[in-house]
Image (tube, rainbow, N blue to C red):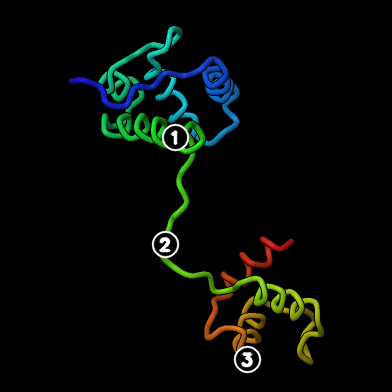
Amino acid sequence: MKKVFIVRLMEVERAELEALVRKGKASAFSILRARILLKADQGKDGEARSDAHIAEALGVAAKTVFNIRRRWVEEGLEAALHRKKQVCPSRARKLDGVAEARLVATCCGPVSQGRARWTLRMLADKLVELEVVDSISPETVRSTLKKCS
C-alpha cells in the first residue's frame, strides 16, 4: 500500500526526538510518539519502517502509527508529540478566576465561631451560601486550593 503521509525529519527534529527518547523525562505518551516518528522517518538517516512493522515493534495499532504520521505532516512536530486540547470540554469549570479569588479570600478570612480552622466541607457550604456557585463538592474546593498554593 502506498503511503500518503510521508515522514522526513530534518536533522534538528531527529536530534530532538532522539534526545527525548534517550532522556526519558517526558511522558510515556510523548516518548512513544517520538519513537514512532523516528521509526517512520524516511529521510537519509531514518529507518523507513512500514506502519505494520512499527505497530508490532512498539505494541500499538497500525491506525495509531498512521494517525501520528498524518498529524506530523498536517500539523507539525509539537502536534504529533502532544495530545490536542479539547475544542469543547465535556464539562464547564465550576470555579472561574473570580470564584477562585472568592474562595481564597473566604479561606483566609475568619472562621465560624467555635471552630479553629476551615474544613473543605465548610468552605464548600460557604461558597453556596454566598451564592458564588449553585453547588460544589469539597473535592473541587480541595483541588482548587491545591492549584492556587
Judge depth for marks 1 and 3 and give the one in front. 1
Q: Position of residue 82 (x, y in %)?
A: 49, 39
User: What residue do we see at 59% from left, 73% from top?
Assistant: 95
Question: Given the image, on which type of amino acid does mark 1 rest?
Answer: Ala
Most foreground residue, 92 or 57? 92
The answer for how far apart the CA atoms under marks 1 and 3 are is 46 Å
Does residue 50 appear left or right of residue 129 in this picture? Answer: left
On residue 88, the disc is: 2
Return the mark for residue 116.
Answer: none
Q: Is residue 80 above or below residue 21?
A: below
Q: Position of residue 128 (x, y in %)?
A: 59, 87
Amino acid type at circle 3 is: Glu
Outermost residue toward the top in this view: 44
Q: What residue occupies the far left of the structure in this picture?
A: 1
Q: Residue at x 30, y 30 (%)?
A: 66
Q: Quadrant of the C terminus?
A: bottom right
- Disc 3 marks which residue? 129
In percent of the image, x 42 and y 31: which residue is there? Answer: 72
The 10 Å Cα crowd at callout 2, few under 14, some 14 to 19, many 20 or more, is few
Label 1 or label 2, whichever comes before in sequence order: 1
Q: Quadrant of the N terminus?
A: top left
- Above/below status of 20 relative to 149: above
Question: Is 129 positioned to the left or the right of 10 in the image?
Answer: right
Taking the spot 46% from the left edge, 36% from the top edge, the residue there is 29
Q: Secondary structure at mark 1?
A: helix
Secondary structure of residue under mark 2: loop
Residue type for callout 2: Cys
Q: Which residue is mark 1?
A: 80
